Amino acid sequence: MRYSIENDTLRLTVDTHGAEAVSVIHKPTGAELLWSGDPSVWGRHAPILFPYTGKLTGGKMIAKGVEFAGGQHGFARDVEHTMTRHTADTLEFELHANPETLPKWPYAFVLRSTFVLDGETIHHTLTVENPVEEQLRFGIGYHPAFALPFDDRHTTEDYEIRFDGLESPLCVSAVPNGLLNGQSYYLARNTETIPLTDELFDNDSHCMVNLKTAHVSVVEKDTGRSVICNVEGYPYVLIWSAAKKPLHFICIEPWHSLPGEENGPLEWERRPCAASLQKGESWSTTLSTTFVR
């Protein structure tokens, strides 16, 4: 089921399936700001990545002594969440461990997803709680896809990724199979911008590590129209689009964890995590996205 909240500038719609934002309408112009989810290109809009980001080594994990198969980006994006709060400016959803999640990941947890409208900004907070486990380790990340171009008068080359200041974004490599291979590369050196081209993602995403910038934005160069993501506190920020040309969208993805390694450990407890919670503890992170039109 889908629920919406709106103010004078934006109308946000979120689906209980995955607690996924599926539409952001700029009300003064009627423009859709999120990717449409056309399955012939990429069938999602802004999935939540939990309890891990990327792929698992060997497509599996060993947790509590049992082997579990796992696909990409965890399961939170593929199951129903429960809407728990709906006010004029807030939507909140919860996912608890249940008979659908336990065969995928044998841990008790609460994942709360809270969306708040604030003018031209959407604040999306993810909170993880450990209700009963002795220790709960997890990975987590965001994967919003923003529609490109902003209108039919522009093409891919009219846009750029912009930082607050000079960056030399160092990226960890997961080519060719989506698993870390121990290699790294500079996407660029001493630059405030990364030009968008239809070829930029021919080898998949770029995972930038330890950026100094507080914001990563996609900017329309001639007008200044933009999507601005606050990435403060995130050790990893990915940019990605489906390889189908021309680009139909651009993802800006702040993550707190990484994919598995090609020859990494299968044991869940040995996998690098975003956080490790003792019983009764909670942890949260927020992605704030501002739409300038």
Image: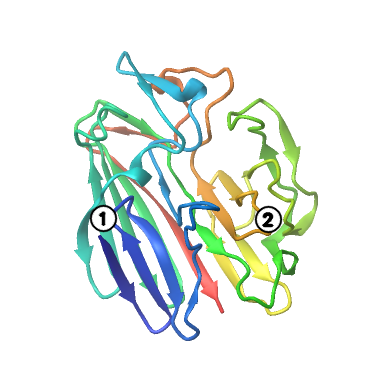
Q: Is residue 202 left or right of residue 233?
A: right
- Residue 212 horizontal side relative to residue 269, left or right: right
Nearer to us of marks 2 and 1 is 2
Spot occupied by residue 280 in the image (x, y as percentages of width and height) = 22, 37
Q: Vertical placement of 25 versus 238: above or below? A: below
Quadrant the N terminus occupies: bottom left
User: Residue 270 shows which numbered tag?
Assistant: none
Q: CA distance from mark 2 to mark 1?
A: 35 Å
Q: Nearer the viewer, residue 40 or 110?
A: 40
Q: Which residue is mark 1?
A: 93
**Amino acid type, label 1:** Phe
- In-front residue for pair 58/142: 58
Q: Residues within 10 Å of mark 1 (few under 14, many from 20)?
A: many
* 261 displayed left or right of 59: right
Q: Relative to 198, does residue 90 appear above or below in the rendering? A: below
Instruction: Tell me which corner region of the image, top left, top right, bottom left or bottom right, holds residue 198.
Output: bottom right
Residue found at the far top of this picture = 65
What residue is drawn where x is 68% and y is 62%? Answer: 162
Q: Is residue 92 above or below residue 182?
A: below
**Image point 64% across, 52% down: which residue?**
244
Question: Which numbered disc covers residue 245?
Answer: 2
Specify the color scheme: rainbow
Q: Residue 287's spot in the image, x, y percent?
A: 46, 57
